[in-house]
Image (cartoon, coloured by chain):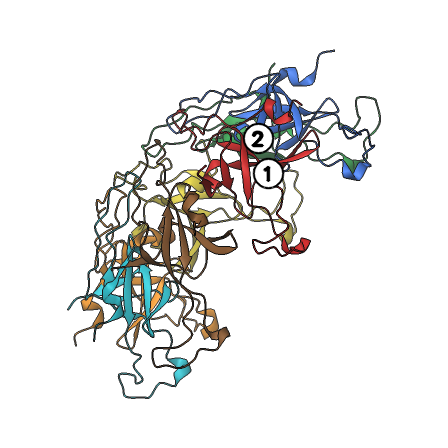
Chain colours: A green, B yellow, C orange, D cyan, E brown, F blue, G red
Amino acid sequence: MARAFKKFIPMFDRVLVERFAPELKTKSGLMIPEKAQGKIQHATVLAVGSGSKTNKGETLPMNVQVGDKVLLPEYGGTKIVLEDEDYFLFQEKDIIGKFES
Amino acid sequence: MARAFKKFIPMFDRVLVERFAPELKTKSGLMIPEKAQGKIQHATVLAVGSGSKTNKGETLPMNVQVGDKVLLPEYGGTKIVLEDEDYFLFQEKDIIGKFES
Amino acid sequence: MARAFKKFIPMFDRVLVERFAPELKTKSGLMIPEKAQGKIQHATVLAVGSGSKTNKGETLPMNVQVGDKVLLPEYGGTKIVLEDEDYFLFQEKDIIGKFES
Amino acid sequence: MARAFKKFIPMFDRVLVERFAPELKTKSGLMIPEKAQGKIQHATVLAVGSGSKTNKGETLPMNVQVGDKVLLPEYGGTKIVLEDEDYFLFQEKDIIGKFES
Amino acid sequence: MARAFKKFIPMFDRVLVERFAPELKTKSGLMIPEKAQGKIQHATVLAVGSGSKTNKGETLPMNVQVGDKVLLPEYGGTKIVLEDEDYFLFQEKDIIGKFES
Amino acid sequence: MARAFKKFIPMFDRVLVERFAPELKTKSGLMIPEKAQGKIQHATVLAVGSGSKTNKGETLPMNVQVGDKVLLPEYGGTKIVLEDEDYFLFQEKDIIGKFES
Amino acid sequence: MARAFKKFIPMFDRVLVERFAPELKTKSGLMIPEKAQGKIQHATVLAVGSGSKTNKGETLPMNVQVGDKVLLPEYGGTKIVLEDEDYFLFQEKDIIGKFES
């Protein structure tokens, strides 16, 4: 299935991510009731912009790339809906960290 | 019919857009009740300014062009009415992304 | 009649404008009741400043000129009264766009 | 009579002004009741600072001079009392415009 | 008597001042009741810092000096008590003007 | 046991820390009731970003390194949960100080 | 006794200070009741950071040194507790002045 985000190009230093499905158990095997699951902070990068512009018009390279597993801040970002699925856009500077594969 | 926006030139890095008509069904064919339709975030670029000025007076080139399909932020922008139709102006930096054709 | 604004020189990047008289009908000929007329966003440029100063003391040229038909933001600007008539001052950067003649 | 402001030197880009006495009639001759007179926006420049400093320590020249008739913003400025008379200090960048003589 | 401020060196662009004693009469000889006396805006400079630093580490020279009679803004500044007497510290940029002697 | 933070790379000038377990006694041996224990300000650095970027795209070196014992501000930082344990991310500029070993 | 702050190194332009014990009498010998004693603004510098960084990565030298008697602003700073004693951290730019010895 062609996915909607494949045709989407974030502007400047924006990064399109898809949050992981929430895990419903703790490591020790306990079920987590829904209201305690919190906001999912892990996500996968689906698309990246070409980079922000300096005030001289130069483009700065991005530091994340498609496929990176990243950690998002608890607040911020913009939710967008592409073909009935939820995605999120963050500016690169607001991404907290990434996980080595 | 000559359309009003044809004579309109946005200043600096402003972009004139026309929002898409809201889709009233989901992909799966369900009707969406009006209050759940939300704010339409997709739009077409109708006119672009000549670019923002650096503090040395140089003009920076724009990154969107007439005809681009873009994604708008949920808030912001300025609504203007030209010949009884609603248009919106955004600064280029606030446009979230564009769609490849 | 000599008009007051002829002797008035805006400072820096300020622009003196006169709003258009409100149109009381829609394109389709319907009368618009007064409270629905909204704030008039169209205006004519009557005087322009010599341009803002960089922090090196250089003057940046202006992008609008006397006679331009411009579109104003819904909020902002400073109302001034010269010889019992209302005029408005805007910084050039806050003018949304202009109309080609 | 030696006037107090003669010995007063504004710092940096500050401008000392004296507001015009309020006009109590409209052009058409009607008396204006006191509460409708509004805040007087016209003023005469009495003293100017030597100019603001860049962050390299250079002084930028001023654009108004003693004797200029200027238009003030409705809010802002600092009222000072010199020998029982009211004067006002504005930063030059906040002066809206000046009148040609 | 050695005064406390003699040993005090303001940091960067700070200026130590002593406010004038309030005048209790108007020029015309009327007594001013205490609550109408307002905040004393006149002061004498007692000590000045060595100047603010640029972000390259250079020191910018000061524009007021010990002994200057200055005019203070109505709000702002930091009150300090040295040997039971009240003094005030202002950043030089917040001093409104000075009086020629 | 492989610890989760080993695979985590903070972005830019962010620093991943683990707070010390709270001490439940004062130096003089008194037990501290829980509500008086306050927020633990001591922490160990577990991972550091590659450094913030200048607006020319250069990377500035970091001033803390893995293993440093640091003092955190009372507020701020972002709590993250990795494999059921709490960690915190701070920007380097917000770390108050470090302890010599 | 080895004091805790001896091992503590403030980051960047931060300064570790210890406030003076409050004086409980005025110069004229009157006892000051506790609620009138105010916040102690005098302090001794115990440790200084290596200096703030410019956005080019250069370190700017500090203007206070260990042992300086300084005057603190009434608000601000961060209280830290090292071995059951209260210390305070200020950024150098917020220190109001110092006293010559």
Please provide percent x and percent y for residue G84. 71, 32
Quadrant of the drawing holding the N terminus of chain C = bottom left
The three-letter code of the residue at mark 1 reads: Thr
* Front residue of A35 and F68: F68
Give the residue at x 59% y 29%: F90
Please provide percent x and percent y for residue E47. 37, 48
Please provide percent x and percent y for residue E8. 43, 44
Q: Residue A96, can we see it?
A: no
Q: Using a 10 Å C-alpha cutoff, classify the residue at mark 2 as few (fewer than 14 neighbours), some (14 to 19) or many (20 or more).
A: many
**Vertical order, E44 against G15 (above or below):** below
**Vertical order, B89 against A34 (above or below):** below
The outermost residue toward the bottom is: D30
Q: Chain of mark 1?
A: G
**Vertical order, C47 against F8 (above or below):** below
Reading the image, the residue beneath label 1 is G78
The outermost residue toward the top is: F1
Question: Callout 2: helix, strand or loop?
Answer: loop
Please provide percent x and percent y for residue B5. 35, 52
> What numbered label is drawn on residue A76?
none
The three-letter code of the residue at mark 2 reads: Ile
Q: Quadrant of residue B45?
A: top left
Quadrant of the drawing holding the C terminus of chain C = bottom left
The answer to whether the residues at label 2 and label 1 have Cβ atoms under 8 Å apart is: yes
Question: Callout 1: helix, strand or loop?
Answer: strand
Q: Using a 10 Å C-alpha cutoff, classify the residue at mark 1 as few (fewer than 14 neighbours), some (14 to 19) or many (20 or more).
A: some
Reading the image, the residue beneath label 2 is F96
